Amino acid sequence: MKSRVIFIVSLAVMIVLSACSYDGEVRETKNNEEQANTLTLSWPVDIGEVNPHLYTPNEMFAQAMLYDPLVVYNNDGTLSPGLAESWDIASDGKTYTLHLREGVQYSDGSLLTADNVKRNFDTVIENSEAHSWLEVVTVIEEVEVVDELTVKIHLKEAYYPFLQELSLIRPLRMLGDAGFPESGNTADGIKAPIGTGPWILTAYEQDQYAEFTRNENYWGKKPSIQKVVVKIIADSQSRIMALEKGEIDLIFGSAQLAPTEFTTLQQNANYITQVSEPLSTRIISMNTTYGVTKYKEVRLALQHALDRQTIIEHVLNGLEQEAYSLFAPGFPYSDIEINEYEFDLDKSAAILDKAGWIVDEKTGVRVKDGKSLTITIPYNSDDQVHKAIYEYLQGTWKEIGIDVQLIGEESQILYGRSKAGEYNLIMNDSWGAPYDPHMYLRTMTGEKQLGFYAKEGTESNEQLTRDILRVIRSTDEAEREALYESIIQTIHEEAILMPISYRQNYLVANDVFEAITFSPQQYEVPINLYEMK
């Protein structure tokens, strides 16, 4: 998926940047060339230990800078060689033989070997409980060293997305031997972030900044930028002020700017702004095991009461595209035609009338068998976009007799509620490349997952579970295509997921770049592809 680029006419502004040493003092830049090849960007939280095998508080963009994948996921959804220059797949789909590149150096000068790759796989598998959501880990039976540069991975059963999941930013990227702790288990932490990636972490102060320097021994094409300084700036207004003052060059990612902030900056000719192609889908997930959303007629009525166009225009400032299918066209197995649920409040009301949900003249809320048509929607109280979307739905749905109860909560409380299934509707974005569609659908088979609650109360529950488990095990391309179409059509007919829009990343930068773009993975900042003036 190539990025759709929107360029704002820019004024040339050359910014003198500085990097920080470990003790936090400002270091004098050596010469103009180094200044011109130093990129400074903001990030809202600290990068963490940058352990390649773990999750939060390790930030994915930093992990991607330091650690290469064995397999690369491309913009068009295809796979190409990474640290593994080629591979063989057994006819039964249960054995993968990876042929490693020769001469690949870690940042400490040590070499990538089959023994080292096995060590990385083994420590991840040892902590498989932490990775139970990820099939690529749980399906591995044994990792075998064939020779110095050949690794054979035996699976318990066929799993067609195996190579695709090796391209993930975590947890199966390689750490140099010297980075392992004394225990040998990276769940205990790492000694140092030693990777084979295009960058080396050369300075760091927690919650303040991180400095990355170009890896001069990188096996692939070296970045044209020499140094990257990441400043931790938690507040969006502070980020914008830093950009205006030239203290940073780049704000990357839709999570760092509200839609209104981005569109305001988009109108400023001093900045370069870009919007990516669709990277994931903004979805509202229904709970078919809880309250009134157990009933299919209620779910169908809600589908017809969703005004995507107004939400996109007035809440998302026109920055996203309307979504009717779960996955954007262009994602693997996702070019499937469905009968869209058009926005029609009269039709929504008629569905509820026919099902016996009658408007109470005193309260204005529909009632059936003494039960009111009340929808409970929890959300992260810090997420103003979600709040605005839900408040709009609350007002619109009130017109047809639906009572919407909004519950703003701290993220950990919201997480607990979602795991317990104590909601009717909840925001549940798809994960984007390279997870979609297989990984998003696979979570529907796991208990206490949002997808599980969406599927569990439907008449098609057992069939959906069988088809999802079957499709990820299938070694036949035609069979997979047919199964994916059936799964997505069934989900649509059961009216359990409400796609709103296809999410896109955006960035704002000062005019110091010759080239700047996006990655197909929404959590990656592809700085190694950037060029500065």
Image (tube, grey):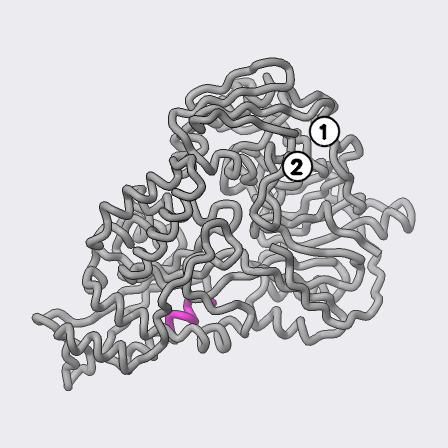
Answer yes or no: is residue 343 visible: yes
**Is 414 positioned to the left or the right of 22 in the image?**
left
**Three-letter code, disc 2:** Leu
Image x and y of residue 161, in percent: 47, 38
Image x and y of residue 524, in percent: 61, 48
At label 2, counting other C-alpha atoms closer than 10 Å, the crowd grade (few under 14, some 14-19, many 20 or more) is many
Q: Which quadrant of the figure contains the C terminus?
A: bottom right
**Is 135 positioned to the left or the right of 37 in the image?**
left
Image x and y of residue 231, in percent: 67, 51
SS class, disc 1: loop
Q: Quadrant of residue 369?
A: bottom left
Image x and y of residue 260, in percent: 57, 73
In depth, the one of 191 and 121 nearer the eye is 121
Answer yes or no: is residue 63 visible: no
**Is 333 positioned to the left or the right of 304 in the image?**
right
Q: Residue at x 12, y 74 (%)?
A: 356
Find out whether residue 243 is within the magenta segment.
no
In depth, the one of 335 and 358 nearer the eye is 335
Pointers 1 and 2 in contact (C-beta within 8 Å): yes
Label 1: which residue? 107
Which is the main secondary structure of the residues drawn in magenta? helix
In depth, the one of 447 and 144 nearer the eye is 144
Tell me: residue 305, above or below residue 242: below
**CA gap, disc 1 to disc 2?**
9 Å
At label 1, counting other C-alpha atoms closer than 10 Å, the crowd grade (few under 14, some 14-19, many 20 or more) is many
Q: Quadrant of residue 518?
A: bottom right
Q: Residue at x 56, y 47 (%)?
A: 77
Q: Residue at x 72, y 41 (%)?
A: 212
Label 2: which residue? 66
SS class, disc 2: helix
**Three-letter code, disc 1:** Ser
Highlighted range, magenta: 385-391
